[in-house]
Image: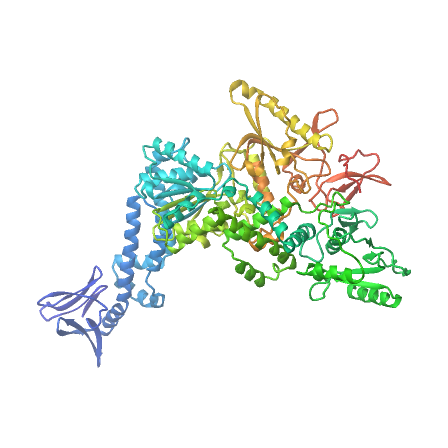
Amino acid sequence: METSNTTWGRTGRRGTRDWQLELRGGQLLLTLPDRTLTLRPGAAGEVRVIRRWLRHVVEVQVGRELRTLTGVGRRPAERLQAFLTAWPHIAEISAWAQHVLATADQAEADGRWISTETMRRLVDGRPQGEQHRGRLDAVWDLLGEAERDALQLWRLDVVRWLAEANQKILRSELQARRDLFRRVESTPLTFEQARAVVCMDNRVNVVAAAGSGKTSVMVARTAYAIARGFVAPERILLLAFNQDAAKELQQRLQRRLAAVGLRAEGVTASTFHAFGLGVIGQVTGRKPRVASWVDSGQGQDKILQIVDRLRDSSTRFRYAYDTYRLLYARTSDDPKGADGDAWDRDSKTARHRTYSGHLVRSQGEKIIADFLYLNGVGFEYERPFVVDTATAEHGQYHPDFYYPAVDVWHEHWALDADGRSPAEFRGYAEGMAWKRDLHQRTGTRLIETTWASIMGADGLVAFGEQLTSVGLSLDWNPDRPSVDRDAVPASHEDMARLLRTFMAHVKAGDLTEEAVEAKLRASPVLDTARTRHFLSVYWPVHRAWQQALADEGGVDFEDMLVTAAQMLESGAAQMPYDMVLVDEFQDTSQARARIVRALVNQPDRYLLTVGDDWQAINRFAGADLSIMREHERWFGRGPRLHLSTTFRCTQEICDVSSAFVGKNDRQIPKTVKAASGPGGQRVRLLYPANNTAGDIRAAVAAELERISTATEHDRAESDRRTSVLVLGRYRTDRSLVPATHPANLDVAFKTVHGAKGLEADYVVVANLTRGRLGFPSQVVDDPVLNLAMAAPDPYPHAEERRLLYVALTRARHQAVLISVHGRESVFVAELLKDGSIDPVEIDTAGAVVPSSVQACVRCGLGVMVQRVSAHGPFLACSSFPDCRATINIPQQRRPTARPSSRRR
């Protein structure tokens, strides 16, 4: 018997071989004296090694004849048997590896990115056989080079191996298409932009920093796909969020594709709304019409009309609506209540304002006091009890309410539906028992309410019955004027805005009344009496809205998008697009995401989404940031790429804004670099001379003069005027912009939301103060919205933080923040604490001088401002009473912070 690594056989007496088995090129060749046969090792019964007594033979099925080959020694026979056992797996692995190599070779030859979908097919086709590794290792030396290479590839992380192949393709394409990438936009593409273009994967999410050229990627990718013949123009769809963006995108495609000798005809750039209408028209044969009041942006006005009509036609609705607006709209679901909105000097605690002018301790007491006032019920708050109860250890007993007209006392208990008080209220049950016993012993009449009873679905009705049962008359008047002008209820406009916002989210989420009820039952956190009060108002409005749409034969945008999504998902609508590109993806709603997912939910479809989660500022309009954050869950696997070079901001602005927004660890991390290199002017914090709106306006004017003077030389060299954006959190901040400004400046006012997508040489944020309409805004989203919206970002002021990031990154050269001493925004305090901004102030002579303002030494949420007490001036945190940090001012030392108009 003679054997080599791949040969078995027997040589006869004259030196001739009676037979030989040879492994060659993945096949077994059997050479006999009269013929040579090709065998399939591992095929049932074709080649077998059999032990007969003390010797081994090889049986080979040749046609109908079974040949027995003798002369095989024990060890060679065992080796042959091991090989025959392992060979089916080797053959399967070799075929798979050949397919992988051919795919990679073809992709490299074509210069075409290997998609995740292709990788997944190759991975799914990978032969199993980890349990056979020992058998495969045992015959390693019997294998040829091709089989060994196949086994090595099989043992590798093939996805990583293909990713390395993609990097080779990327380098090759960047070189081969350098002329296209140089000319397709007005400036050559950066490496990051070109990489996003070449990466023709099935699902690509591009996270683009502000001013990093995300639109250039969309245009260049379209040109690249057409130029390479990967996708025909008529099979490309670009989706934008508004008409202006879609129009600009279409024009830019035509202009830039023409610059590289390509035609944009056939490429579709559309808004989601226009596209959705087209989908419905294709399926139904009748393109729907958007209702007139929806199309003109008057949905909130329509809500007001519906509410007026319902209030006139239904006493039940009127009472439910007025009750929610006047009593519940500005309360929380927590029996402990939110922070008070007024400071009580006597008790030195924060309390709650009421329409009657009383300052009460809790939200429950506020609801009761306001209910009493609106019903014309006279009461006294915390009147001393008729019996003297003061002792050396305890003060005089003051029941919560007293009704002098009927001589009845009223205690309101902070108890939930299970009769439990907040855990931190120690001794609460004992106090309740003592008070009840006192009233019983003294023979005084007492009525009782609890937080749970007041917040119950019919709680106020039951409370009203309690009052009438003791002889009080109720005269409900929702128009009764408030004694305390600062105790402001939610306005009708506030309610219309809330109802329309809730409706937009309900519709975008395709939520029915039954679905909302199911969500309530499934979540104790959401299922509160306050929420149910709101829903008793909302659903009649919702039904009236739908009826108004039907009467006009129109649709609204939310219903239209959901209907289009359903048609695409069901297959009723077939759209001819192989490549879909979506702009401003951080603002995507669930309905839009469903449309996009349905469009690419077939093999060999390509999706590119571009956006910046740091600029996600439209949650109120239905945007769901989790869709971008969870891109893979929604659309499938694919790379997330970054555009980190900004062509707009200086590095100084990049560093300050990135550090500020990046404190929220739920934001997608990225490093932003300025194309202009390091450095740049520091972000300024400017204080006006005093604390009035007029002085803020004067500070804006002073800043415009400073910018005018600083850029006068630039104007001499160019006819272009220096652009300045004055930004406000609300439209009312427009009043802070002076009517006239220097001639060499191009000044415009925008809200920060309205400035999204814009840029200017300088940005002035005009009113970074604390307050309800401050920045961050303290107009808190109503908790009921959480029933229809995605889970809110738990980071404090998360969306407002992103809003300030947007404001800062509109500036090319410098950003300036304007605040007021003693009323600084928490954002100002944070930026001061971090050393991110340079504070300056306008002194009484009108000169701008450095400011010595400092962040609070304890909380970091306020700044230290000068106060005056009976003992003289001192520094205290502007967040008082939430923070009570103080610093004594030695008499010989000059104050380090200017006085504030706010006093304790």
Residue 320 lies in quadrant: bottom right
**Residue 705 in sight from this viewpoint:** yes
**Residue 190 in sight from this viewpoint:** no
Q: Is residue 716 above or below residue 7?
A: above
Q: Residue furthest front?
A: 313
- Name the side, left or right, on which 655 lies relative to 234: right
Position in image of residue 715 (x %, y %): 54, 20
The image's colouring method is rainbow
Quadrant of the image containing the C terminus: top right
Position in image of residue 749 (x %, y %): 59, 31
Residue 32 lies in quadrant: bottom left
Q: Identify the residue shown where x is 80% and y is 58%.
A: 472
Position in image of residue 674 (x %, y %): 51, 35
- Name the side, left or right, on which 237 lies relative to 416: left
Position in image of residue 293 (x %, y %): 52, 42
- Name the side, left or right, on which 630 lies relative to 820: left
